[in-house]
Amino acid sequence: MAIAIDSSIIDRLTEVDPDRARAARLADPDVRDQLFALYAFHMELAKVPELVSEPMMGKIRYQWWRDCLDEIYGDRLVRSHEVTTPLSEMIAQTGISRFLLDRIIDGRERDLDPRPFSSLEDAVDYADATSGGLAVAAVAICGGEGGEAAGRAWGLTGLARSYRYYADAMLQEIKFADIIEAADTAFIEAGKSKLGDALPALAYVATVPGFLKRMGQSNYDPSQHVPSYAPFLKQLRMLRSVVSGRL
């Protein structure tokens, strides 16, 4: 069902989160706008650390979104923002649990913490709360259940792709090879999931093996390189996933 989401928001989402934007376009038209609203909400949360110079200012921004959810779920007047309107309409139309959205906010708030992950398990928990939480919410919008393993695979792959930037920060206690192995394990688990009609919404996860293959090459140096993956090839892989019904 169509909701009031401005085309400029979709354009910005396509620029900063192109893979999820592509997946949303592959989904059933009845849920496409709802997915755009969800992914736009996540986009706003993910950019917070880039906008603030102090963690406390970031916490205030995350609390702003929690307060926004208070208004939406409390049937009160919702504060004006280009994303709050489509978000409130999406929630009204889908009845999605607030727990799922709060979990995403909590997960993204970890980005403000300068401390490194103490273990691989911490990194997996982070992936579950962020990309995993978002995937579960997307599946719920499509009327299904599950999706966390798919989101975990995507989140861990994202950490591996960004290892160059976080090797001396959040990932300094974790070996690159361990992240790759955990991402591969999560993708195998995700492949066993029965996502049904929700699969197109997570079609971007189908590109995980391609990223892992590129990062597994002998000449790949995670401290220097970032894996490349042509948009056309990613789009083709997503289409194959949707047609086959498998990640």
Image (cartoon, rainbow, N blue to C red):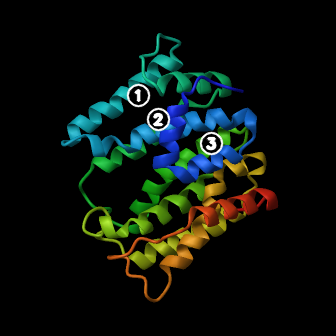
Task: Indicate the amino acid at tag 1.
Answer: Arg
Q: Residue 10, located in which quarter of the rendered image?
A: top right
Above or below, 69 against 197 in this view is above
Residues at marks 3 and 2, CA–CA distance in whole angstroms: 14 Å
Residues at marks 2 and 1, CA–CA distance in whole angstroms: 7 Å
Query: Which part of the image, by quadrant, shows the C terminus?
Result: bottom right
Residue at disc 1, secondary structure: helix
Image-based side of 200 in relation to 40, left or right: right
Task: Indicate the amino acid at tag 3.
Answer: Ala
Residue 212 pos. (x, y %):
54, 74
Image-based side of 224 in relation to 184, left or right: left
Residue 94 pos. (x, y %):
67, 28
> Quick check: marks 2 and 1 in contact, CB under 8 Å?
yes
Residue found at x 19% / y 43%: 53
The residue that disc 2 covers is 102
Task: Indicate the amino acid at tag 2.
Answer: Asp
Q: Can residue 231 be seen in this view?
A: yes
Pointer 2 or 1: first along the chain: 1
95 and 161: which is toward the camera: 161
Label 3 Cα crowd, 10 Å radius (few <14 / some 14-19 / many 20+): many
Residue at disc 2, secondary structure: helix
Q: Is residue 100 visible?
A: no
The residue that disc 1 covers is 66
